[in-house]
Amino acid sequence: MRVLALDHGTRRVGVAVSDTLKMIARPLEFIPAEPFPDCLARIRELIRTQEVELILVGMPRNMDGSYGEAAARVREFVAVLKESILVPIRTWDERLTSVQAERFLQEGGIRGRDQRQKVDQAAAAVLLQSYLDSLSPSVG
């Protein structure tokens, strides 16, 4: 079973998935946020095809730890998901995931339009990897 990470945005939802050992996150795709019924249908399909046991949704926070308008939109998104999907859903702090994702893409030579199209799914992968790393016992 895998963990599916969602980086919710007003235009797109970035998606990443873990491996079955829950050690490595990989970017999967982005889903247009609207129309929402289509977005929800795609999330359901991914839950089935990827054999997902947990959905992780990035929770935006300000650098001081407070929550803003974006967090309120994510809470609404999570509430609708919980009404529509039986898989457990958990939120995870997503501070700086987009910044890290942009840096990784730039270092990989991906720029401009290609970068804009991939940043959402890359941010979901950064978010998911952060969560997966928190599950692993520290070594050394």
Image (spheres, rainbow, N blue to C red):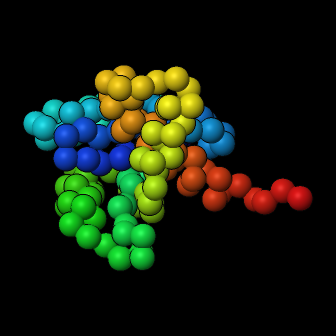
Q: Is residue 79 above or below residue 125?
A: below
Q: Residue furthest left?
A: 35
Q: Is residue 45 above or below residue 63?
A: above
Residue in the picture at 25% in, 38% down: 12
Residue in the picture at 31% in, 24% down: 113
The answer to whether residue 49 shows anywhere in this view is: no
Q: Residue furthest right?
A: 140
Across and down, in percent, residue 9 comes to 26, 47
Q: Is residue 100 left or right of residue 62?
A: right
Across and down, in percent, residue 29 comes to 37, 28
Residue in the picture at 27% in, 32% down: 31
The answer to whether residue 6 shows anywhere in this view is: yes
**Residue 21, quarter of picture:** top right
Q: How many marks?
A: 0
Nearest the eye: 140 or 108:
108
Quarter the C terminus occupies: bottom right
Nearest the eye: 137 or 108:
108
Q: Is residue 93 left or right of residue 32?
A: right
Quarter the N terminus occupies: top right
Q: Is residue 125 left or right of residue 112?
A: right
**Residue 43, quarter of picture:** top left
**Residue 13, quarter of picture:** top left
Across and down, in percent, residue 41 comes to 21, 34
Residue in the picture at 42% in, 47% down: 98
